[in-house]
């Protein structure tokens, strides 16, 4: 049985999943671009990279992504959350084009259209399949 | 600059398959963990933020899921040492959308109807196009 359990707050959580994922990856890319090529023979450079503002901010955002992604999975199906949050690829492409000034080919814009259509498909449907098996614990029974 | 030693087609397919397999296993197990725990907002309201974090990190499915995601990451690194990012990245990412839909239907008993299959396939094609 499927049902829609989405509220405004939950759409906001999905938005946070999308934004933190795309901004986190873009911040990492920006930081590593500024740092230049890192040799695997000099791991200290990677530690230095983590301490730079862009890379550090990117890591913080990706931690926020994982936390909000897990939150979304606690009230929506995996097959709902994954396509719905893939809008992050679209945001990443827009950031790459207009902030990092990268070239985006027509085929990549077509990819943006496909992803947007996929997100449209899934978000118009129910978000959650109610569990049928008895081994799934209701939230009230979970103890800290 | 080091150049990747390109593997045979069969070896490349096996590497991509390995990345997709571990990523799917990780996603399914973490999703299963969150489903067992229940609505995190409700858990946090009852037990506080620390209680919610403890409920997640002490769940066996979550631990094994994160381990599988780590294996997926290292499989990806291994694949990238033998092949180009432009091949491995989009192939692994886009195939994972489809494999997740199949695995979610099989193991999580999610209702993957035509709408969700279309969404997975459209996003799969879109991600592949973005890498071109």
Image (cartoon, rainbow, N blue to C red):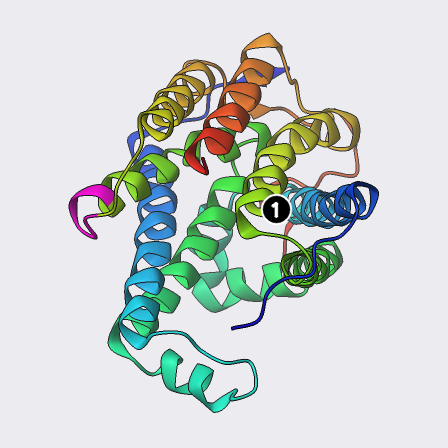
Q: Which residues are magenta?
A: A97-101
Mark 1 Cα-neighbour bin, 10 Å: few <14, some 14–19, many ≥20: many
Q: To which chain does the residue with label 1 belong?
A: B
Q: What residue do we see at 34% from left, 83% from top?
A: A51
With respect to residue B41, does B116 lie above or below? above
Q: Is residue A144 visible?
A: no
Q: Which SS does the magenta portion mostly show? A: loop
Q: Quadrant of residue A61?
A: bottom left
Q: Which residue is mark 1?
A: B88
Residue B13 appears at what percent x and percent y? 77, 41
Residue B40 colored in magenta in the image: no
Left or right of residue A102: residue B86: right
With respect to residue B129, does B119 lie above or below? above
Residue A108 appears at what percent x and percent y? 36, 30
- Regarding mark 1 in the picture, which secondary structure is present there? helix
With respect to residue A74, does B105 lie above or below? above
Q: Is residue B125 visible?
A: yes
Q: Nearer the viewer, residue A73 or A134?
A: A73
Residue A127 appears at what percent x and percent y? 50, 24
């Amino acid at each position: 049985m499927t049902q829609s359990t989405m509220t405004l707050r939950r759409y906001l959580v999905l938005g946070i999943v999308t934004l933190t994922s795309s901004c986190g990856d873009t911040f990492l890319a920006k930081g590593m671009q500024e740092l230049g090529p890192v040799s695997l023979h000099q791991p200290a450079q990677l530690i230095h990279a983590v301490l730079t503002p862009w890379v550090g901010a990117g890591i913080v955002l990706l931690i926020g992504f994982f936390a909000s992604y897990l939150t979304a999975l606690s009230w929506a199906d995996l097959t709902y959350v994954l396509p719905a949050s893939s809008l992050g690829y679209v945001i990443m492409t827009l950031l790459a084009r207009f902030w990092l000034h990268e070239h985006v080919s027509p085929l990549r814009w077509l990819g943006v259209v496909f992803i947007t259509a996929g997100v449209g498909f899934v978000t118009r449907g129910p978000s959650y399949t109610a569990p049928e098996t008895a081994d799934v614990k209701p939230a009230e029974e979970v103890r800290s | 600059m080091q150049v990747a030693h390109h593997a045979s087609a069969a070896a490349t397919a096996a590497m991509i398959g390995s990345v997709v397999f571990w990523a799917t296993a990780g996603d399914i197990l973490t999703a299963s963990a969150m489903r067992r725990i229940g609505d995190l907002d409700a858990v946090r309201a009852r037990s506080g933020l620390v209680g919610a974090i403890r409920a997640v990190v002490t769940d066996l499915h979550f631990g094994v899921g994160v381990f599988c995601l780590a294996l997926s990451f290292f499989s990806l690194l291994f694949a990238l040492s033998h092949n180009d990012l432009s091949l491995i990245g989009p192939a692994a990412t886009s195939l994972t959308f489809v494999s997740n839909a199949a695995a979610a239907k099989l193991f999580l008993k999610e209702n993957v109807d035509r709408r969700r299959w279309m969404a997975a396939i459209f996003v799969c094609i879109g991600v592949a196009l973005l890498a071109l």
